[in-house]
Amino acid sequence: MANLISYLQKDVPAKGAKPNNRINQEKLKKYLFADEYNHLKLLQKIPKITLQTTKPLLFYPGCGVDILFPLFYVEALFQIKQVSFLFVDKDNTLGMIKTILDDISIHFSERKNILRFYWNGIPVDVEFVTGNVFELLEKIPSFDIYFERAFRIMREQHLNYEQQIFTKLNKNGVLISDSGYQQCNLKVFPVPQELSSYREMIAGQKE
């Protein structure tokens, strides 16, 4: 029987970013389906990818409350000194993201809509923007990593979206998606298809 994931937002105060956080693995499992958690080990089969920067910007549209998966992928695939996340969603889910971090024993600092915390020693900044990504895309800065999960239905009505994303992706930047982007000129890495519910997982680098 599949586990049930429930979200209950709490009023979580910022306690300050702490480099020596120890992630509560048992509580972390509450926010993942059993098969998702088991598939995380498959990330180790993907070769490490070299970026032009050790301080990349990751763009994640339609993020919902998902703070965990971009962290898993960034830690597994790249050797970096720090990372900045730019999250865009039509619903303001920052409160739930703070709840999840606090629940798994990750303390954070907060300035306006930007969180800072440490994930296994990696400094992470998260900027959350509430809005329609298809209307905001022209204003989004170029980025080093594009991350997408369960966004296919939303973008299918915007035929130029994949090309727009490819254009915004910096040279040597990496695109990670659970579907699509087959027509983009990317150096594609072998990735386990079990990582995608569509069985269309792609990780590719812009040359």
Image (spheres, grey):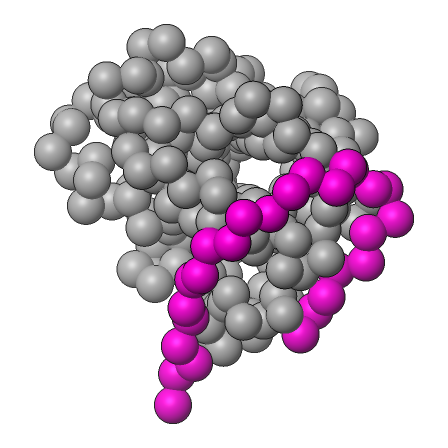
In this view, the residue in front, 12 or 198, is 12
71 shown above or below 28: above
Q: Does the magenta stretch include residue 17?
A: yes
Residue 102 falls inside the magenta stretch: no
Q: Which of 21 and 75 is in front in this view?
A: 21
Residue shown at 62%/66% (left/top)?
28
Q: Identify the residue at image location x=38%, y=22%.
A: 166
**Residue depicted at 15% across the width and 27% down the height:** 159
Can residue 190 be seen from the camera position used here? no
Camera-nearest residue between 150 and 78: 150
Q: Give the range drawn in magenta.
A: 1-26
Q: Residue 135: where, in percent of width, then height? A: 23, 17
Q: In this view, does 72 lie above or below 164?
A: below
Main secondary structure found in the magenta portion? loop
Rendered image quadrant of residue 110? top right
x, y percentage for residue 173? 55, 25
Residue at far right of view: 20
